[in-house]
Image (tube, grey):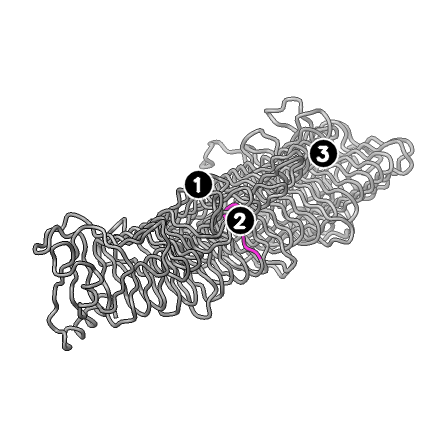
């Protein structure tokens, strides 16, 4: 039943009784009744008491359902130009409430009445005390009352209701009590219903206070306990007194054995006090607390909202400028115990705390956040500030779950912009510029698109997100995007410009089905830091599913090591890195524009097990770069590093200096296998296998796996590079890989210091030079085509432990063939070589076919070998196709590419 209908029914019941004829009783000088109390005693239910303007002392008692109207000009007419004041005798104290309403059926209406200046020594309700009745207000002011040893300075409700007449206003100002300086509502039948008042200005709570001087008082404006409810619409709750002390909150919902609800809609909850005397906005305790805040502003408090164990829903609400230096966690919102928060289209702006400037979730609390197409959720300018302050926007140290846009039907943009985790004092130690997650119980954060992280800063690690122990799941819906842009770690040693994983799991687009884009653009670590976009450290997993782009369009260095991704784990810390780039149309993961000061311009891996499928390193517009050292696209470093690259392209990398710069650096005991996996395109693979590459569909000079065009960048005229460097006991295996057009010394591959290189079905063509084996280097080559290289095709150091086994291969058309040091070991079998001692010196019959250069025509290489271990060639074609196995990387007779008369190919 609606409230107005309920009131109509009650009044009809009253009017149908023995007092059916309502009377008007006049109060004031010259009127029938000299005082309000005489009229109240004489009135019957449904009567109206009209009081002349003026001051009338209390205490007063009403025991009937009557209407009390103040401000009349005389005793006879309906003219009203003033107010009627019920007042106490402040500064003299009182032993009773100024106005007491006894239990009754129906309601008491106060209209244009002021209740003021009553100082009650003991007991509740200094201004108005209501028991088991309904009080309706219109143009009422309740001010300057104080309950010294009780609750409810302005109004005390004991299983009673207070409400506003439709389109009415009420001012509750400068009242004070132990709890509920403005209103204290006690009991499961108690309600504050300020929901039908004047549009834009129904109830005003101004500068109400509590008696406590140590910051422990409860609810300076409103205190709900034992099941009390409050529903406020278009109301203002404001503190503007610069007190040296204050309560715990301006609105308090106490723990209750029954449901206790607070609803705010279109309300402003404002604190204008100076920094040192701020206190909390809203505090709700207990599992029965139910909070709903819509279209409201909560601003300027020590903390905007504290929720322990209860539930809260925020809709299109702004929490702004909350927090101060001693706010431990959650400047905007603090969730404790088993609290549950649901937030839609909220804005958390410029809040700050030691941890979680915008929101903090502790204990077992959980939260879920949604945006809307017409009203994004925004976390902007929030900060965590302390000697060690974490999570500029969100701090999650809870067993509970956090989620964004996790709904099949209700979602929209969520934005994290310019949030900051800051460190005070000496040394940068703060983590997670936007979000910090860590708990021993491994909590899960599920973040869905559309979602953006822009210009967030961590003083130490994780410019956008820091993940300690936990699970971070990023899921972009088809046609939508998750974007990390220009996030960074500000200290020199800061790691993970966008995401820092220190244990736990980071999974990107790992759900079944198709996905939208996840982009990392212009993120950077500290100048001596690791992982411009992602730093993945220690035990755990980093799994990325296409489509994902790592980009850096400028010339800014993105990290010291690992321009985009840095992954490192110590011995005994199993760590898995998996990038799966196939998304139905070629390589769907791109790492481009990474710029490292040291190693790993695109990616740096150490001590991890990594599998990269269908990944593109570098683009013509955004090559990966190094200032010095090696591994322009990828570095694998140290024993325990095992990397598998399947259908991967590494192109366009280079350096700014004359040293290092190899596209792929395999160093210090690391093991890398790079291979092409062939099959019919779009055929789903078995678990653990790569999506197949159908080479014939790729076009001219396009390959399933390639290391090409590295070491020559127009913007770096002095740069050198090369295909790969294998050093210091490391191992590199290439199978079905094109190593072409690389520039360096050597251009294609260098093997040093006990390194091992095994190549099968590999073309090494048109590089500035071929392969150089240093002292202690070993190489096994089968079905290799080495052609068109400037300088030597192979160069073997003059050392007894330098060893090359070359079989079923072609070495032809290079400026120099094979250069062998006297002590080096060279074993050959069934080769065609421009250096006669290494094979027959006969034209292999190269043709430039529709698939590319250095294919086999009708020459010496055709059916050249009687046996082979290989069962397919570099394009995935089966071997043999004739009476024998063809030498070199390709099998089968190819036709020369036709010479076209016209550019468009139509003859």
Of pointers 1 and 3, the one earlier in the residue sequence: 1
Q: Quadrant of residue 660?
A: top right
| Rendered view: 655 above or below 272 | above
Q: Nearer the viewer, residue 212 or 664?
A: 212
Give the magenta-colored segment's residue range: 356-362
**Mark 2 surroundings within 10 Å by alpha-carbon count, few (fewer than 14), some (14 through 19), many (20 or more):** many
Q: Secondary structure at mark 3?
A: loop
- Determine whether label 2 and label 3 are within 8 Å by CB: no
Residue marked by disc 2: 394
**Residue visible at 51% across and 63% down in the picture:** 309
Residue 636 rendering spot, x and y as whole percentages: 73, 42
| Rendered view: 78 above or below 704 | below
| Rendered view: 460 above or below 164 | above
Q: Nearer the viewer, residue 299 or 886?
A: 299
**Residue 264 left/right relative to 651:** left
Which quadrant of the figure contains the N terminus?
bottom left
360 magenta-colored:
yes
Single out the mark in the foreground, 2 or 1. 1
Q: Is residue 849 visible?
A: no
Q: Secondary structure at mark 2?
A: strand
* Gap in angstroms between the C-alphas marked 2 and 3: 38 Å
């Amino acid at each position: 039943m609606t409230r107005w209908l309920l009131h109509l029914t009650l009044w009809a019941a009253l009017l149908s009784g023995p007092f059916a004829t309502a009377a008007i009783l006049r109060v004031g000088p010259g009127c029938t009744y000299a005082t309000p109390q005489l009229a109240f005693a004489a009135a019957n239910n449904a009567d109206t008491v009209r009081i002349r303007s003026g001051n009338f002392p209390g205490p007063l008692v009403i025991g009937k359902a009557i209407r009390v109207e103040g401000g009349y000009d005389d005793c006879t007419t309906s003219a009203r130009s003033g107010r009627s004041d019920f007042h106490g005798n402040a500064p003299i104290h009182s032993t009773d409430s100024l106005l007491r309403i006894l239990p009754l059926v129906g309601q008491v209406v106060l209209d244009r009445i002021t209740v003021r200046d009553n100082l009650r020594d003991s007991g509740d309700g200094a201004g108005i005390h209501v028991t088991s009745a309904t009080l309706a207000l219109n143009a009422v002011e309740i001010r300057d009352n104080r309950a010294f040893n009780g609750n409810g300075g302005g109004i005390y409700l004991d299983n009673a209701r207070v409400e506003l007449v439709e389109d009415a206003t009420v001012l509750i100002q400068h009242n004070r009590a132990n709890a509920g300086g403005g209103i204290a509502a006690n009991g499961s039948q108690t309600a504050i219903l300020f929901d039908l008042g004047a549009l834009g200005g129904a109830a005003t709570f101004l500068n109400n206070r509590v008696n406590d001087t140590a910051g422990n008082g409860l609810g300076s404006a409103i205190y709900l306990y034992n099941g009390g409810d409050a529903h406020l619409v278009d109301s203002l709750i404001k503190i503007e007194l610069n007190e040296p002390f204050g309560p715990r909150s301006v609105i308090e919902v106490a723990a209750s054995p029954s449901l206790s609800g607070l609803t705010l809609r279109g309300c402003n909850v404002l604190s204008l006090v100076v920094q040192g005397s701020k206190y909390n906005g809203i505090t709700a305790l207990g599992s029965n607390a139910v909070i709903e805040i819509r279209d409201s502003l909560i601003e300027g408090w020590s903390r905007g909202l504290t929720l322990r164990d209860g539930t809260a829903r925020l809709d299109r609400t702004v929490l702004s400028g909350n927090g101060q230096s001693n706010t431990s966690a959650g400047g905007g919102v603090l969730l404790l115990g088993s609290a549950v928060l649901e937030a839609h289209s909220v804005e958390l702006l410029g809040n700050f705390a030691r941890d979680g400037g915008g929101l903090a979730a502790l204990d077992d609390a959980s939260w879920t956040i949604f945006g809307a197409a017409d009203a994004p959720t925004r976390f902007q300018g929030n900060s965590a500030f302390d000697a060690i302050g974490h999570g500029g926007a969100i701090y999650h140290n809870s067993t509970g779950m956090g989620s964004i846009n996790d709904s099949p039907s209700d979602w929209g943009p969520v934005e994290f912009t310019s949030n900051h985790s800051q460190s005070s004092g000496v040394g940068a130690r703060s983590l997670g510029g936007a979000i910090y997650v860590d708990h021993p119980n491994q909590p899960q954060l599920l973040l869905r698109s559309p979602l953006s992280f822009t210009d967030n800063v961590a003083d130490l690690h994780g410019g956008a997100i820091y993940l300690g122990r936990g699970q971070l799941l990023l899921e972009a819906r088809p046609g939508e995007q998750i974007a990390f842009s220009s996030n960074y770690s500000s200290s020199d040693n800061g790691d993970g410009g966008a995401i820092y994983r220190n244990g736990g799991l980071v999974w990107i687009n790992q759900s079944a089905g198709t996905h939208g884009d996840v982009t990392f653009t212009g993120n950077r670590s500290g100048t001596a830091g690791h992982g411009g976009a992602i730093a993945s450290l220690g035990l755990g997993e980093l799994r990325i599913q296409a489509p994902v782009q790592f980009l850096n369009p400028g010339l800014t260095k993105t990290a010291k090591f690992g321009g985009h991704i840095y992954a490192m784990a110590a011995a005994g810390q199993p760590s898995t890195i998996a990038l799966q780039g196939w998304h139905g149309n070629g390589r769907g993961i791109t790492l481009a524009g990474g710029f490292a000061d040291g190693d790993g311009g695109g990616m740096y891996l150490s001590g991890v097990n990594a599998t990269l499928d269908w990944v593109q390193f570098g683009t013509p517009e955004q090559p990966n770069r190094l200032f010095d050292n090696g591994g322009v696209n990828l570095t694998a470093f140290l024993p325990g590093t095992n990397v598998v690259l399947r259908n991967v392209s590494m192109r366009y990398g280079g350096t700014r200096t004359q040293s290092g710069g190899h596209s792929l650096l395999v160093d210090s005991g690391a093991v890398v296998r790079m291979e092409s996996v062939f099959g019919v395109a779009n055929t789903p693979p078995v678990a653990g296998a790569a999506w197949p590459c159908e080479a014939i569909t790729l076009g001219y000079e396009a390959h399933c796996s390639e290391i090409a065009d590295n070491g020559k960048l127009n913007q770096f005229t002095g740069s050198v590079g090369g295909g790969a460097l294998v050093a210091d006991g490391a191992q590199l295996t290439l199978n079905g890989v094109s190593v072409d057009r690389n520039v360096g010394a050597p251009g294609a591959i260098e093997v040093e210091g006990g390194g091992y290189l095994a190549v099968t079905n590999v073309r090494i063509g048109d590089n500035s030079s071929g392969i150089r084996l240093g002292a202690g280097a070993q190489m096994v080559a089968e079905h290799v085509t080495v052609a068109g290289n400037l300088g030597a095709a192979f160069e073997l150091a003059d050392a007894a432990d330098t060893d090359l086994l070359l079989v079923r291969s072609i070495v032809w058309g290079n400026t120099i063939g094979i250069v062998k040091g006297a002590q080096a070991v060279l074993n050959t079998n069934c080769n065609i070589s421009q250096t006669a001692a290494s094979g027959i010196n006969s034209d292999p019959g190269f043709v430039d076919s529709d698939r590319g250069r250095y294919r086999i025509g009708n020459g010496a290489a055709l059916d050249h070998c009687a046996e082979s271990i290989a069962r397919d060639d570099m394009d995935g074609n089966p071997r043999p196709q004739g009476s024998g196995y063809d030498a070199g990387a390709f099998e089968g007779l190819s036709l020369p590419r036709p010479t076209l008369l016209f550019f468009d190919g139509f003859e």
